[in-house]
């Protein structure tokens, strides 16, 4: 499944919390290829993957909790350089004969760590006291034999340890989070200095690998790709096009739930920059017809998903693979599946299924296709980097994530052509002002939501109005699994609000959503 199975990865062992993905990304940022494996992995399976190093992630608060995730101790006999983090640090300490005490003391948030014994290879050369991010109950009270204590905190005598001989290290804090002062340096010291790994992996060399792989998979057959206008499908389509040129046909379903200018962007800018052969399916009337009278979010999602498949199947019937026997349908389909989708669906790694991932247009498994998924091992920022390298326009590569069901799930209430027009205008204003203020890289995305079933009283000119509110939902996030609301500058908010209430009909109020995720999801529906 990996972008390059010949490449020996750093394996990040996932103990069930959501730190593993972040660690895997930070390892890649250090120029070393990484993948995630579940903690249930056996020593034999690890040996088979032949990793260059292991990183044990954080997890639940106590190794003593009932059902606390454990690790096959034989893994420590494989002689692979290993870094334990937080819970992984404690698992490691216990497995190697150290002591983990349940002291009742808890450390959460920012803490001062004091470097001991020169800090060794992990912390050497760093400030004697550094601010680190903690989140734990138990603590390592005694390091295993042969290990040197490398740091402590006021409450934790053994906050970091290491054995150069074994090339085993551990830290109680989270070096992968930005709140830890020298976090990335700790990871890099482990990878480059302790494990001796070169920083020679980058998302750029994925292009070459993938082009070769796609050619081999496809041969002379024809391929179709569902283009949604989003970053993932734009990049995966461009990558496949680079590999096989006109053997590829991209299909763009205009379901009428798109943002302003989106169709033109795909039909003009995208085609101009890639030269891809594109078919647009005009399906707005069909979609809106089926959405009539429906306001339940799940029902909307189901209808949109179903209609998308119908539109796509129609194209599939019409296009045939000329390279094959007469009339044979095309069997290859490109999908923009990303690594977080794979991990979160438990795909290939066996980790917890957090939520079923929603794909480009929600194509189901039973569509009879062999999938081409060139982004399957990549994170979003890596996908953007590849898109830029392939020469895609910034307006497409840099754009915010946009859900497959589109504006249909950003209208709270029934979806109608009239309401879509209102929301499209408001959304365009918000996006324009955010871009103008240079805030695109600061926010992950900013859904703009029309509360179509809510009205409030306002005054405009001399008259009373009774219009709808628009909600702004700017969020900051690393991966959309968790998010915080973005503290946008007041003057930008004010500009957006004024322009929307003055320029968009039937809207007389703009409100700001200040909910994190959890408990609120990013989209309202
Ligand atoms: P939630 O609302 O679950 O969204 O916090 C998390 C991320 O997923 C996007 N999203 C979707 N993307 N099809 C998609 O392709 C969908 O049905 C869908 N629903 C939510 C959302 O925009 C956010 O980035």
Image: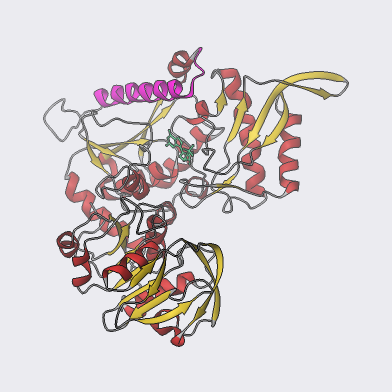
Q: Is residue 13 above or below residue 164?
A: above
Magenta: main secondary structure equals: helix
Q: Position of residue 498 (x, y in %)?
A: 76, 36
Q: How is the image coloured?
A: secondary structure
Q: Position of residue 276 (x, y in %)?
A: 36, 41
Quadrant position of residue 33 = bottom left
Comparing 28 with 333, the one in front is 28
Comparing 134 with 376, the one in front is 134
The reply to whether the magenta stretch includes residue 241 is: no
Q: Position of residue 399 (x, y in %)?
A: 51, 45
Q: Is residue 384 above or below residue 286?
A: below
Q: Residue at x 43, y 81 (%)?
A: 150
Comparing 226 with 328, the one in front is 226
Comparing 299 with 280, the one in front is 299
Per the rendered image, the range of residues in magenta is 293-318
Q: Specify the farthest residue to the right.
A: 462
400 lies left or right of 350: right
Q: Specify the farthest residue to the front.
A: 103
The image shows a total of numbered marks equal to 0
Q: Residue at x 46, y 70 (%)?
A: 184
312 lies left or right of 110: left
Q: Residue at x 23, y 72 (%)?
A: 80
The reply to whether the magenta stretch includes residue 316 is: yes
Quadrant position of residue 249 = top left
């Amino acid at each position: 499944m990996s972008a390059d199975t010949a490449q020996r990865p750093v394996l990040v062992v996932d103990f069930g919390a959501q730190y593993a993905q972040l660690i895997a990304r930070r390892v890649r940022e250090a120029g070393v290829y990484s993948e995630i494996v579940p903690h249930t992995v056996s020593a034999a399976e690890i040996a088979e993957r032949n990793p260059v190093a292991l990183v044990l992630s954080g997890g639940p608060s106590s190794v003593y909790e009932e059902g606390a995730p454990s690790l096959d101790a034989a893994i420590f006999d494989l002689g692979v350089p290993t870094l334990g983090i937080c819970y992984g640090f404690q698992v490691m300490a216990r497995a190697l004969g150290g002591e983990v005490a349940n002291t009742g003391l808890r450390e959460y948030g920012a803490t001062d760590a004091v470097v001991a014994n020169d800090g060794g290879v992990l912390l050497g050369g760093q400030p004697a006291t550094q601010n680190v991010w903690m989140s734990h109950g138990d603590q390592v009270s005694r390091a295993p034999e042969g290990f040197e204590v490398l740091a402590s905190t006021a409450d934790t005598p053994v906050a970091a340890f290491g054995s150069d001989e074994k090339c085993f290290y551990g830290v109680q804090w989270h070096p992968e989070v930005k709140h830890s002062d020298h976090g990335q340096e700790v990871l890099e010291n482990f990878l480059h200095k302790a494990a001796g790994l070169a920083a020679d992996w980058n998302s750029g060399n994925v292009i070459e690998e993938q082009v070769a792989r796609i050619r081999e998979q496809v041969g002379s057959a024809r391929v179709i790709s569902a283009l949604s206008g989003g970053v993932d499908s734009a990049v995966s389509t461009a990558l496949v096009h680079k590999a096989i040129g006109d053997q590829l046909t991209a299909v763009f379903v205009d379901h009428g739930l798109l943002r302003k200018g989106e169709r033109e962007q795909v039909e003009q800018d995208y085609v101009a920059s890639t030269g891809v052969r594109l078919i647009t399916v005009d399906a707005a009337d069909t979609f809106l017809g089926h959405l009539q009278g429906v306001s339940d979010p799940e029902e909307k999602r189901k209808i949109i998903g179903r209609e998308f498949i119908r539109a796509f199947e129609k194209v599939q019937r019409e296009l045939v693979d000329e390279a094959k026997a007469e009339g044979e349908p095309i069997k290859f389909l490109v999908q923009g599946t990303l690594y977080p989708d794979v991990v979160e669906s438990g795909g290939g790694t066996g980790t917890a299924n957090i939520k079923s991932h929603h794909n480009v247009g929600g194509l189901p498994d039973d569509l009879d296709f062999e999938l081409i998924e060139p982004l399957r091992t990549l994170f979003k920022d890596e996908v953007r980097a590849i898109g830029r390298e392939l020469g895609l326009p910034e307006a497409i590569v840099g754009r915010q994530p946009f859900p497959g069901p589109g504006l249909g799930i950003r209208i709270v209430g029934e979806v109608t052509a009239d309401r879509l027009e209102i929301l499209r205008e408001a959304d365009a204003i918000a996006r324009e002002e955010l871009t103008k203020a240079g805030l695109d890289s600061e926010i992950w995305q900013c859904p703009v939501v029309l509360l179509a079933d809510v009205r409030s009283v306002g005054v405009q000119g001399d008259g009373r109005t009774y219009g709808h509110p628009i909600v702004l939902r700017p969020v900051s996030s690393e991966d959309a699994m968790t998010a915080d609301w973005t503290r946008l500058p007041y003057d930008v908010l004010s500009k957006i609000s004024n322009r929307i209430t003055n320029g968009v009909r039937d809207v007389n109020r703009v409100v700001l959503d200040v909910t994190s995720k959890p408990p609120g999801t990013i989209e309202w529906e």
